[in-house]
Amino acid sequence: MAKILLSSFFAFYVSLFLAGTSLASYGSVACQPIYGGGQTCVTTEKISINKTVLNPLKSKGGTTDVFVDNLSINDPKYAPTQTVKFQLTVTNSGNSTLNTVTVYDILPDFVDFVSGPGNFDKNSRTLTFNLSNLNPNESRTYTIVGKVVSPTSMPSDQGVVCVVNQSIAKFSDQESRDNAQFCIERKVTTKGGLPVVPPPSITQTPPTGPEMLPLIGLIPTAGIGFLLRRKSK
């Protein structure tokens, strides 16, 4: 009986050791033994995603090639049929390797998908791809290219439309999200396709009514005075 109990205790502690080893090697938890037996495990992974959009501001040499977090309605705007670029950076700020990270990038309305890693689903407008073995303190950056739709596909009653591009990174039960906003300006035109020009500002002309007649009558008097002055010299 004593041998059976001893064997049972031995098997129990071996199973605990193997379980602790498998948890520690999996990398999703960090386990430490506690006084009196057993162990405590805490999650150590930290995943983050940063989404940016290219500033369409043009310089003498072309575009600025500067990616920003957001573009408000007061910032430079994209135009219909223009190419728009996004960058997303996934970072592992934990102390263990992330075996597989799944990234979802959801394109906004009025932007068609052009290129990027992974597979794009037209129905959900979502680009999906995986990152393998993202090491501690490692960051990986990806570029996604889209194209603004034609003017006929834009709202006819809105000159400016602001949209949001969303990105999601998932690992196990952890998730990180980030957005990038930008605006699209559609030039308002007439039925013939000509740009609508705002009316010119009206400037006030000097008064020329009856109240100016007394001043006009003074003009001959001023001329006679000028001639008499010259003769006196």
Image (cartoon, rainbow, N blue to C red):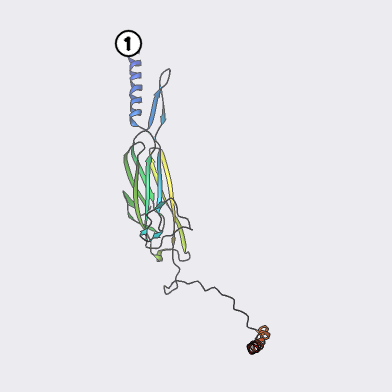
Q: Is residue 213 above or below residue 151?
A: below
Q: Residue furthest front?
A: 233
Number of labelled discs?
1
Q: Which residue is mark 1?
A: 3
Q: Is residue 91 above or below residue 162?
A: above
Badge 1: residue crowd in 10 Å (few <14, some 14–19, many ≥20): few
In this rendered view, identify the residue nearer to me: 201 or 5. Answer: 201
At a point 39% along the width and 43% down the height, the residue shown is: 169
Could you say where residue 227 lies in the image, as x and y percent from the top left?
A: 63, 89
Quadrant assignment for the N terminus:
top left
Please identify the quarter of the rendering in which residue 135 is found: top left
Q: Is residue 96 above or below residue 211?
A: above
Could you say where residue 122 lies in the image, as x and y percent from the top left?
A: 35, 54
Q: Amino acid at mark 1?
A: Lys
Please identify the quarter of the rendering in which residue 214 is found: bottom right
Secondary-structure class at tag 1: helix
Q: Is residue 111 above or below residue 214?
A: above
Please identify the quarter of the rendering in which residue 7 is found: top left
Could you say where residue 191 lies in the image, as x and y percent from the top left?
A: 44, 73
In this rendered view, identify the residue nearer to me: 47 or 102. Answer: 47
Residue 1 seen by the camera: no
At a point 33% along the width and 20% down the height, the residue shown is: 14
Quadrant assignment for the C terminus:
bottom right
Residue 17 seen by the camera: yes
Could you say where residue 130 lies in the image, as x and y percent from the top left?
A: 32, 43
